[in-house]
Structures are given as structure tokens and as C-alpha cells.
Image (cartoon, rainbow, N blue to C red):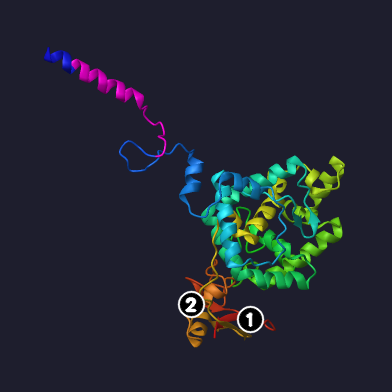
Amino acid sequence: MHYLRYIYLLLVLHSAACAVKPGAAQSGTNQGGTGKVENNQTPVEQANSAQPGVASSDTAHSAATQPDSTPPGYTPSPTAQSEMADRGQAQLLTGVPFMPDELTFAGEAVPLTDPIVRDRLERELIKNVYRHSGTLSVMKRVQRYREPITTILTKNQIPADFLYLAVAESDLSPIAESAKAAVGFWQFLEPVAKEYGLEVNKYVDERRHLERSTEAASRYLSRLYRTFGSWTLSAAAYNGGPTAVNNNLRGQQVTSYYDLYLTPETYDYLFRILALKLLIENPERYGFSVPAPEYTAPTQEIEVRQDVNLVDLAKQYNMTYNQLKYFNPWLLYRSGWSPSDKYYDKNRALNVMLEVPAGKVYRIQVLK
């Protein structure tokens, strides 16, 4: 009869096990009496609850429906930045970045009520938000270059929003070069660069000179605006060429960039600029933290009116050749030399010598 007792005991244990289904949440406590409640949240809910101060997905949705009323140049308080960062991170957990209800480029309204326009902007936002390391690097460069670029643009009556065109063109890298040999901050081709007064030769390439290239870009943008009477179309023409934009406006019988069907690059071009504007002006909203630079080397500008050995010049100001190149990326590292060149023997490996044409003055940044 002992085996009957064993069978009875097994049946009791089996019934108890069936009463507690695997994965089912218990009321208040688990069987061990530890007070732990099993978690039936979705992965997004778990991620939200795991981060103190991060809003729920409902809060994220609410934040996403608010208009973007942040004025240009506004710097939120540390508390506001923290709250915005929390909302931005919560929004990113849903997979779709924050979309404003209102937006302008160079004072011209973006028609975000048009679902096609909204979709195109959203796609560019997604690309750049999730291109995290590249976008963060751009944001750091903007801290260095924003003031000198916008000062020159404003002086030439070009809207400050064209800073973001330069960002879209080159990521604000002075040594950026495209497959079509467009170079520098504003990605000028050599013939256009020379047309607008930039010097390009074996010693220097002023397409990599921040101030000189921005002055040239300002003149070109002014010309485009006189042609189109619209900053939005001027930006499109900067990328696609004025002839192509004009032909498409006439052929498609429209007057707005947002109504044009263009080649893929120009079709998305302004939306990349707009996405970068949103990200750079509100980094916390999109989950980025961009602290102020901890250290900036103080420099001064000197004038060079005659041929000079760049290594010797650097030593004169307690610099290395490497540092001189960093502050003056328009001084070329290497070009093709021939025996007929003035400093062929010294420059065979790199341009140690800088040849200064008669009457020319180069302004070079050196350490203070």
C-alpha cells in the first residue's frame, strides 16, 4: 500500500504545479514571499521604467505633438536640458524622432501639413539621429565654427540658417572632398572656386579656408537669390545647379522647391539641411549630450608677405608643423612637384616652403 501513498503524493504535487502557470504574474508577492512582482511589460515599457526620469511612451507621444517653438539661439537651463533629454530618449525608444509642427528655413515656412513633406523630413531625421557618432562629431565641430560662419553670412545678408547647408555639404570638415573633386567647407569645384576669388594651387587651397570660402559662398548664394527670389530654391540650386532647378520649375509648372520632383540627391537635400538644423539647435531633444569644449587653444593672426619655410615659421611661434597645419588646413600638405618648381628640392616630400606671389599677403593662424 506504500506505493499508493507515493502515487497520491505525486498527484498532489502535479495539481499544485498546474495551479501556477509559468510566466504568470502573481498578486502582490511571489511564492517565496520576497515581494518581487513578475514583469509583464513590453520591451519599450521596460526600457522606460529602467531609466529614472525617462518619460513613458505616452508622455513621449504627447511631447512629439507639441509645436517646436524654441527660438533660435535659445539656451535652456540645465533643468530644462535634463527634462528635454529625458523626453528625447523616451521618444527614441519608440523608434521615431521628435517631429515639430512648425519649422522654417531662412525665414521661409516649411509646409509640414503636407504629408509628403513631413515624410521626407522624418526620413532625414531618422538617418541623422541614428548616424550617432557622425552626427555627434558634427555637433562638436559646430561649436568651433558656428560663430565665424554666421558672422560672415550675416554681414553679407545671407540668413544664418545657411550654416546648416555647409554642415550638409561637408560635415564642417575643411579637408572634405567629394568623388567629383568638390573640396572644403562649402564643397566648391575648382573652376567655381576660382570664379569667386579663391586661390587654388600647389601651395594653398582656399576652399579649405574658413573665412575665405564662406565669403565666396556668400557671394554665390546672393547671386542665386537674385535669380530665384527664394532662399529655399537657392539652397536647392546650390546643390543641383541653377539651370537644372530652373528647367524643372518650368517643366513641372510649379514655383516651390517642396513641389518639385528632382534627382534623388537634390530632392532630399533641403530636408537633410532641415534635419541637421533641428538636431543641432535641440540636441537634448534627440538624445544627444554635447558639452561645451573644455579647452580652446588661443591663436593670433600673422601676415606673411614673402616666401617662408613653414617648419621654421612654426618653431618661431613655439609650434610644430602639425599644429600649424591644424590651424591652417588651407596650406596644402603635398602636391605634384616638378624639377622646374622654385623649391623643388625642399618640397619634394611635402610643402615645407610656402611661395608667396609678389604683392600677395597670406594671413596665417599661429599660437599666441
Could one spot residue 221 in this view of the protein? yes
The residue wearing badge 2 is 321
User: Which residue: 32% across, 40% down?
Assistant: 33
User: Which residue: 53% across, 71% down?
Assistant: 293
User: Which residue: 54% across, 86% down?
Assistant: 368
Q: Could you tell which of marks 1 and 2 lies nearer the N-terminus?
A: 2
Q: Position of residue 255 (x, y in %)?
A: 86, 47
Read off the magenta span: 7-28
Task: Label 1: state its secondary structure.
Answer: strand
User: Which residue: 70% across, 84% down?
Assistant: 359
Q: Position of residue 201 (x, y in %)?
A: 63, 69
Could one spot residue 205 in this view of the protein? no
Q: Is residue 169 above or below residue 113?
A: below
Q: Which mark is residue 126?
A: none
Task: Label 2: state its secondary structure.
Answer: helix
The residue wearing badge 1 is 363
How far apart are the two marked residues, 1 and 2, measured between alpha carbons? Answer: 16 Å
* Dot 1 crowding, Cα within 10 Å, few <14, some 14–19, many 20+: few
Q: As drawn, is 303 to the left or to the right of 350?
A: right
Q: Position of residue 156 (x, y in %)?
A: 78, 71
The foreground one among 163 and 28 is 28
User: Which amino acid is tagged 2?
Assistant: Tyr
